[in-house]
Image (cartoon, grey):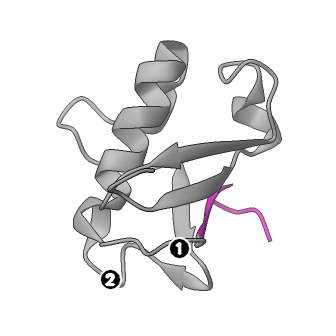
């Protein structure tokens, strides 16, 4: 049905008001950046909180694809597979 993987994105409490109150959203994309594009297209208010002016991940958040930080992988260019989970975590949260 979809050409790109469908991934669950976990939204932290700090950002839920910008994502329609959802704690989890399903999006489709081949990379983490494409997932964020889909998320921000559906919920435009979240963009300024999640994506910095230069198009990179905002410094106040860490993003994990499964157990791996995307900063340790290929950042927003990190490829995603079917049924993976992307978690957005405020920096300093444990």
Q: Residue at x 58, y 73 (%)?
A: 84
What is the span of residues highlighted in magenta in the rendered image? 85-94
Q: Residue at x 47, y 15 (%)?
A: 44
Q: Is residue 15 magenta?
A: no
Who is closer to the viewer here, 73 or 34? 34
Residue 73 - label: 2
Q: How many marks?
A: 2
Quarter residue 87 falls in: bottom right
Q: Is residue 89 magenta?
A: yes
Any part of residue 58 in sight: no
Q: Residue at x 82, y 23 (%)?
A: 21
Q: Position of residue 25 (x, y in %)?
A: 67, 41
The reply to whether discs 2 and 1 touch (Cβ–Cβ < 8 Å) is yes
Q: Residues within 10 Å of mark 2 (few under 14, many from 20)?
A: few
Q: Is residue 74 above or below residue 35?
A: below
SS state under label 2: loop
Who is closer to the viewer here, 5 or 71? 5
Q: Residue at x 76, y 29 (%)?
A: 16
Which residue does the numbered mark 1 point to in the structure image? 65
Q: Position of residue 76 (x, y in %)?
A: 29, 59
Q: Is residue 52 above or below residue 21?
A: below
Marks 2 and 1, how far apart at CA: 9 Å
Who is closer to the viewer here, 26 or 15? 26
Residue 84 - label: none
Q: Residue furthest left?
A: 54
Q: Is residue 25 above or below residue 68?
A: above
SS state under label 1: strand
Any part of residue 83 in sight: yes
Residue 68 shown left or right of residue 2 in the figure: right
């Amino acid at each position: 049905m979809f050409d790109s993987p469908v991934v669950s994105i976990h939204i932290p409490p700090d950002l839920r008001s910008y994502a329609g109150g959802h704690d989890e959203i399903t999006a489709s994309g081949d990379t983490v950046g494409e997932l964020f594009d889909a998320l921000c297209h559906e919920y435009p208010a979240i963009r300024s909180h999640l994506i910095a002016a230069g198009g990179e991940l905002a410094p106040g958040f860490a993003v994990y694809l499964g157990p791996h930080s995307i900063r340790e992988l290929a950042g927003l260019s990190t490829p995603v597979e079917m049924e993976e989970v992307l978690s957005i975590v405020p920096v300093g949260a444990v």
